[in-house]
Image (tube, coloured by chain):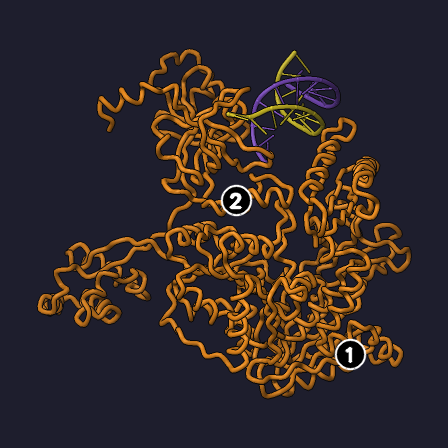
Chain colours: A orange, B purple, C yellow
Amino acid sequence: MENQANTLFTSFDADEVTFFADLILPIPVPKLFTYRIPRGMADLVKIGARVIVPFGKKNSRVLTAIVARLHNSPPANYQARYVTELLDEYPLVNSYQLELFRWMAEYYMCCVGEVMNVALPSGLKISSQSKVQFNPDFDYPELLTEHEEILLTELKKQPALTYDELSRLAGEGVNIAALIKSLVGKKAVIVFEEIREKYVPKMIRKIRLHPNYEEREQLLVLLQRLEKLPKQQEVVMRYLRHVPVQHNPALNQKGLDKTILNQDDELSQSSLQTLVKNAVFETFEVIQPRFADTSAPQGEIRLTEHQQRAAEQIMARFDQQNIVLFHGITGSGKTEVYIHLIQQALAGGSQVLYLLPEIALTTQIVVRLQRVFGDKMGIYHSKFSDNERVEVWKGVVSGQYQFVVGVRSAVFLPFDNLGLVIVDEEHETSYKQHDPAPRYHARDVALMMAHWQQAKVLLGSATPSLETYYQAKQGRYGLVELHHRFGDATLPNILLIDTKQEKRQKTMKNEFSSALLDALEMNLERKEQSILFQNRRGYSPYMQCEDCDWTAECPNCAVSLTYHQRDAELRCHYCGHKEAVPRLCPTCGSTKVKTIGFGTEKLEDQLQVYFPSSRVLRMDLDTTRAKDAYGQIIREFESGSVDMLVGTQMITKGLDFDNVSLVGIFDADRLIHFPDFRATERSFQMLTQVSGRAGRRAGRQGTVLIQTANPHQSILQKIIQNDYKGLYEEEIQERQDFNYPPFSRLIKLTVRHPDKAISQQAAERLCAELTDALGSTRVLGPEQPLVERIRNQFLFDILIKIEREKVNIKAVKAYIQDRINDILTDKGLRQVSIVIDVDCL
DNA sequence: AGCACGCCGACT
DNA sequence: GTCGGCGTGCTC
C-alpha cells in the first residue's frame, strides 16, 4: 500500500507524467490505438504485455490488446480512453515477435491486428461476458412492467447473471436486450463486464500416502491394522505396487493418479474415500501437462554412414552460411539427420523450431521425436485445443520447451534464442496460409525470424521448390544432398501405363488398367500392401443427364457438384452447399442421370468389387474429419490388417509404412495439365512424393504404376528417372523466359462483388491504374479465375509481377495499396472487396 | 471484424 | 404509426 509521502509525490506531478500506450487491437484496421494508462498501472505496463480495453461506441466491446509502444504525448484530436486491466506482468510477446508483426503487416499488406489474430492462440485473448446484477439501491418498483418484475425477482436471488442465462429464464419471444436496457435506464440493475482468462490449466486429482506412513515401520503397522479390512488393504497394496514407497520415499511425493487406483471395481472407490478420511491417504491437485511424459527417453540415435556424412556437411555449410537446403531423396532418413542436428543445437543452449506441414505432423515422426526428446519437446498443432496451445506458448516463455515441433503457426511462438529452424518438406504449399489475412508463408516467415535471431535454417525436401533450389544454385543457400535411401533400400521402379492403349484393347475395367489390377492381385497374394492415389475426393465430380446434358451445379459457385455416395448427396467443395441426389433429371425428367469421372470414394467402391475378400481403407478429407480419424486409419493400415489404402494428397506426406510395395496413381494427366505455371513443378513433387511411399525398406524394390493417356510426356520421364535436376533446368528456363518466380515476386489481387459487372468494372479500373504506373509487362489481367464465382461473389484476378532486382518493392506495395483504397472508398463501387495475396502460390 | 446508427418495407 | 431488414461508417 502507498504511504503518505508516496501519495503526495505522485499527485505532485500528476499532469506532467501521463502515460499513453499505443496498442495492437485484434481488428483489421491499419493503425494502432492510443489509450491512457491508469496511474497505478504505469510502472507495471511493459511493451509486449496484454491489456484489456473498452472499444467502440458506448463501450460496446471489450478487447485484448498488445502494448506496442509507451509514450507520454497525448493524442491531438481525441480524448484517449483508459486501459481497463493489465494481464501480464511480463511481456507475453517479445520484441522479436513485435518486429515480426510489423514486418508481416508491411510485407503481406495486411493489418498488424490481423497478424496478432493468427499469432496468438485464442486462449490468450480474453472472453468477456456481460453480467447483470440487481441494484440494491433501487426502490421504485412501481416503475416496472410485468416482465421486468419477473426478471428482477430472479436477479435478487443470485449474485449476477449473464445475458444468456437471463434470456433462458425469460423464455422464448422476449427481447432480453431491450428489457435489460430498460431496467438499466430505471437504475434497477447494473451491467458489468466479467473478464476472465480463457485459459484454464487442466488439473488432475492425485493421491499419495500420508507422510506419516512413508517410514517402513509405520507402514507395516498400518498394513497390520488393515488386516481386518481387506478392501482397504487391497487399495493400499495396489498403491504400493505402483509407487514403491519403501524403496524410494521420494516417489510418494509425486503421488498417483486417482483413476489408476480405482480402475475396475467401484468398491475400491469408497474404500479409498475412507482411507482419505482417516488420513492414510491425502489428495492433492497438479496441473496436468498436456502431453503425457513419454517413457524412458531414448537419447542415442545411430546414423548410417550416409546420414553421418550429410549431417557433417550441413554443419560445415552452417559455418559459412545461415541457410542450407538439404536435398535428400524420399526414404533417405532425413529425420535422423534432423534429430542429430537438433540435439547439437539444444546442447549449445539455444532453442529449436521444427516446422512440418499440417498432415505430416500427426504421424510417426512425432512419436519418434518424442521418444528422443521426451517432455522437453513441445508440440504445436492445429488439431490441439486452445489450452494445449497456450501451454506450449507458456512453456516456450518459461523455458520448459526448448524445442517445438509444429505447423505453420508455430513460427509465432515466443522464441528469443533460436539457434536452429528446420523447415521440413520445404516445398509444401500448405505452409502458405490461404484464407484469412495475413496470407503468409511460414517458410519465409521462419527465414525472417531466424535472420533476426541469427539462427541457422535448414530447408529439407526430396523435391525442393524451384525458388529454394534456385537460391542454392546461386550460392545464397548452402546445398547438401543425400542420394542414398535408408538401409540401402532402392528407389521404386516406376512404370507408365498407357490407358489409351488399354482402352483400345478394351482391357480397362472402369478406371483400372489391367496392369494395375494384375499388380494389385499379385500384391494381395504376397500379403503386401498397396497405396492408390487419386487427388479428388467424393464418388464422382459430375452428375449429368444423358438425354439433355443437364449437370448438377452449385447455386452459389460456378462449379459442378460432387456426388458423395456414402451420404447420398451432392456437395460443393467450395462453399459446402449440399443437396439431395435427383432421381430424375430436373430439366427433362429423364431417368438417365449418370455420374461422370471418379474420386477416391468410387475407387474404394470398385476395389471392393474386384477384390471382395480384401480390406480397403480410404483416407481423404471426408474420412478424416473426426477427431482422431487420421491417426486411426494410419494405425490400422500400419497393423497390416488392411490391404489397400486409397487416398488424396493426404497420403503423400510423411507416411512411412514398411510393408507397402505397390503404389498406383490415377489421373496423372489432370495434375500435369492444370492451367497454372507451377503445374509441372507440382506434379513432379506430388508424384515423386507418392511414389516414395513404396518400398521404403530394403529387401524388395517397390513398384509404382502411373496411369496416363500419354506416357511420352517429358515430365513423366523425369519422374521415372527421379531426375529432379533435369526438371529444374527445364522449368527454371521457362520461369526466366516469362519472368515468373524466382525471377519475380507475385502479388495477386482478387476483386469480389456479387454483381459481375461491378466486379469487372472495379477490376478493370484497378488494373488500368496499376498498368499505368507499373507498365503492362508487370500487370496481367483482369481475368476470371478457373472458378469465376464462389459463394455468390464474382471474382476477377489481377496478377502483378515485380522483378526482384532494382525495384523498390515497398514503394510498389504502397502504391498498390493506395489504388486499392481508392477503389474501396469509391461510392460508385460499394461493397467491392479486394483480397491481396503477396507471394501467391 | 463487429457494432451502432440510419433509412426504407410489412406488420400490429 | 412501429419493428427490423440491411447498407454505411467508425472504432483511441
Nearer to us of marks 2 and 1 is: 2
Q: CA distance from mark 2 to mark 1?
A: 51 Å
Q: Position of residue A778 (x, y in %)?
A: 79, 47
Earlier along the polypeptide chain: callout 2 or callout 1? 2
Residue shown at 63% from the left, 84% from the top: A490
Q: Position of residue C12 (x, y in %)?
A: 51, 25
Mark 1 element type: strand
In the displayed structure image, the side of residue A174 where residue A348 appears, left or right: left
In the displayed structure image, the side of residue A103 where residue A142 appears, left or right: left
Specify the amino acid type for callout 1: Leu
Chain of the residue on which disc 1 is drawn:
A
Chain of the residue on which disc 2 is drawn:
A
In the displayed structure image, the side of residue A725 where residue A330 appears, left or right: left
Q: Nearer the viewer, residue A576 or A478?
A: A478
Specify the amino acid type for callout 2: Glu
Mark 2 element type: helix
Is A196 located above or below residue A160 in the figure?
below
Q: To which quarter of the image does residue A715 belong? A: bottom right
Q: How many other residues sit within 10 Å of disc 1, few (<14), some (14-19) or many (≥20)?
A: some
Residue shown at 78% from the left, 58% from the top: A676
Q: Nearer the viewer, residue A601 or A825?
A: A825
Q: Which residue is mark 2?
A: A99
Picture quarter with the C terminus of chain A: bottom right
Q: To which quarter of the image does residue A660 belong? A: bottom right
Q: Which residue is mark 1?
A: A496
